[in-house]
């Protein structure tokens, strides 16, 4: 039984390490691209969405980011405000 627990721990640890590595890679790629702030007058040319950050669990406006490619294949990171998911209607 102890060997099974150790094997399970190692398997889950390997999955978590791989997820963390993938997350670090996307953060590093996004770090090379300057962050643009969205306004209502921003002209967007979005051909392909690469990644969107998770929305914070807060009640109120929170920042979010979207990484995308335009029609020329250039990568952009756009920061914008969204309503957090922490509000309850009851």
Image: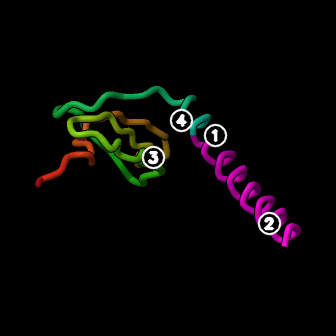
In primary-sequence order, the first of circles 4 and 3 is: 4
Q: CA distance from mark 4 to mark 1?
A: 10 Å
Q: CA distance from mark 2 to mark 3?
A: 44 Å
Q: CA distance from mark 4 to mark 3?
A: 12 Å
The range drawn in magenta is 1-26
Say the numbered circle drawn on residue 59.
none
Residue, x 22% and y 40% (percent of image)?
59
Q: Using the image as rendered, state which of residue 42 and residue 71 is in the foreground.
A: 42
* Quadrant of image for the C terminus: bottom left
Residue, x 35% and y 42% (percent of image)?
56
Q: Is residue 60 left or right of residue 64?
A: left
Say the numbered circle drawn on residue 30.
4
In primary-sequence order, the first of circles 2 and 4 is: 2
In primary-sequence order, the first of circles 4 and 1 is: 1
Secondary element at image label 4: helix
Secondary element at image label 3: strand
Place of residue 35 in the rendered image (x, y in percent of width and height, measured from the top left): 42, 28
Say the numbered circle drawn on residue 5.
2
Looking at the image, is mark 4 or mark 1 nearer the viewer?
Answer: 1
Q: Residues within 10 Å of mark 4 (few under 14, many from 20)?
A: some
């Amino acid at each position: 039984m102890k060997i099974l627990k150790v094997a399970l721990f190692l398997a889950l640890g390997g999955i978590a390490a791989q997820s963390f590595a993938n997350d670090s890679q996307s953060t590093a790629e996004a770090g090379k691209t300057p962050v643009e702030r969205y306004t209502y007058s921003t002209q967007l040319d979005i051909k392909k969405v690469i990644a969107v950050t998770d929305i914070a669990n807060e009640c109120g406006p929170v920042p979010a980011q979207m990484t995308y490619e335009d029609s020329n294949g250039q990568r952009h990171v756009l920061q914008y405000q969204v309503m957090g998911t922490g509000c309850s209607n009851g």
